[in-house]
Image: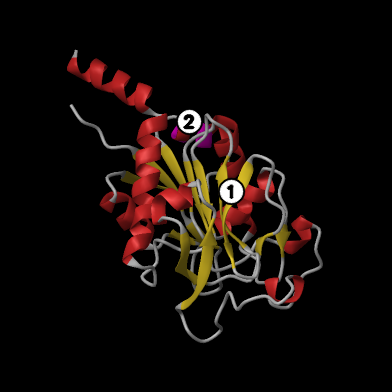
Amino acid sequence: MSTKPIIALNADYRPAKKDAGAFTWIDSGYYDAITGSGGIPLVLPPLAEDDELRQVLEHVDGLVLTGCKLDLEPVRLGFEKHPATRPMPNRREDFDRRLARIAYETKIPTLAIGAGMQTLNVICGGTLFQHVTEEVLKSLHHRDPVEECLRHVIEIVPGTKMDAIYGPGEIRVNSDHHMAVDNVANCFRVCATAMDGVVEAYESIEENWWCLGVQFHPESRTASALDMQVFETFIEGVKEQTAPAILSFERRAAA
């Protein structure tokens, strides 16, 4: 018997308005990329209780921390709010932070994308830039206020997961952010940067935790065909880390 890994994805959230109720949704690119890479996606709403969240995560094999068009709340990061910052709803950020913390504690294989990458870095002890344009010397454009698809070059660090995915040298990726990772948490190492030094990818240095964070969006319709390899490599990493559990399930089913 062959089983596909089940991958949890955190959904986006919008609170109620005068003319509409609260609702949860997710960009289809995330679950299409998971199914296209050999996994089964499971969308998580913003659960209120950690016990419930841990119970769900006990039944999945990996986690994608998804991105968001909105930002982390700057006051919680020790910043004064910049005019360009548009904080995500508290319920979404609170859930994402708790999910990231549990992911780190349980060492569930994790792919963190965009704001998910930023959140995980903060939870693990790293820091962020609130507004790259003003905080990074000679910064590139990382977001286009008009065009949906801004692309720029990133440089890959040899011997990293990004190197295994794309090969050595430089590639172009999509870009749509103004916050970014500043100091990388101690449990990570940088594996790709933009030409202005902004961190575009990091990975876990802990042997028992498969984790990759990317600032760009391999699930987006603006991604290149090569970016699908990010999800394919993630699914392979999930299988490798959870192989004993998967084999045990198969043996029980066969019996």
| Snapshot quadrant of residue 6 | top left
Q: Earlier in the sequence, mark 2 or mark 1?
A: 2
Residue 194 place in picture, x, y as percent: 58, 67
Looking at the image, which residue is at 72% across and 66% down?
130
User: Mark number for residue 78?
Assistant: none
Say what amino acid the circle numbered 2 marks: Gln
The secondary structure type at the circle numbered 1 is helix
Q: Quadrant of residue 73?
A: bottom right
Q: Amino acid at mark 1?
A: Phe
Closer to the camera in the image, 92 or 116? 116
Number of residue marks: 2
Asked if residue 106 is positioned above or below residue 91 in the image, the reply reads above
Q: Which mark is residue 55?
A: 2
* Color scheme of the displayed model: secondary structure
> Is 220 drawn above or below residue 208 in the view shown?
below
The image position of residue 31, as x and y in percent, is: 34, 54
Q: Position of residue 110 (x, y in %)?
A: 48, 43
Classify the position of the C terminus by image quarter.
Answer: top left
Q: Taking the image as drawn, is residue 44 in sight?
A: no
- How would you rate the neighbour count of disc 1 (Cα within 10 Å): few for under 14, some for 14-19, many for 20 or more? many
At horizontal 64% and vertical 64% (from top left) the residue drawn is 198
Q: Residues within 10 Å of mark 2 (few under 14, many from 20)?
A: few
Q: Is residue 172 left or right of residue 98?
A: left
Q: Which residues are magenta?
A: 52-56
Is residue 219 toward the left or the right of residue 186 in the image? left
**Residue pointed to by mark 1:** 95
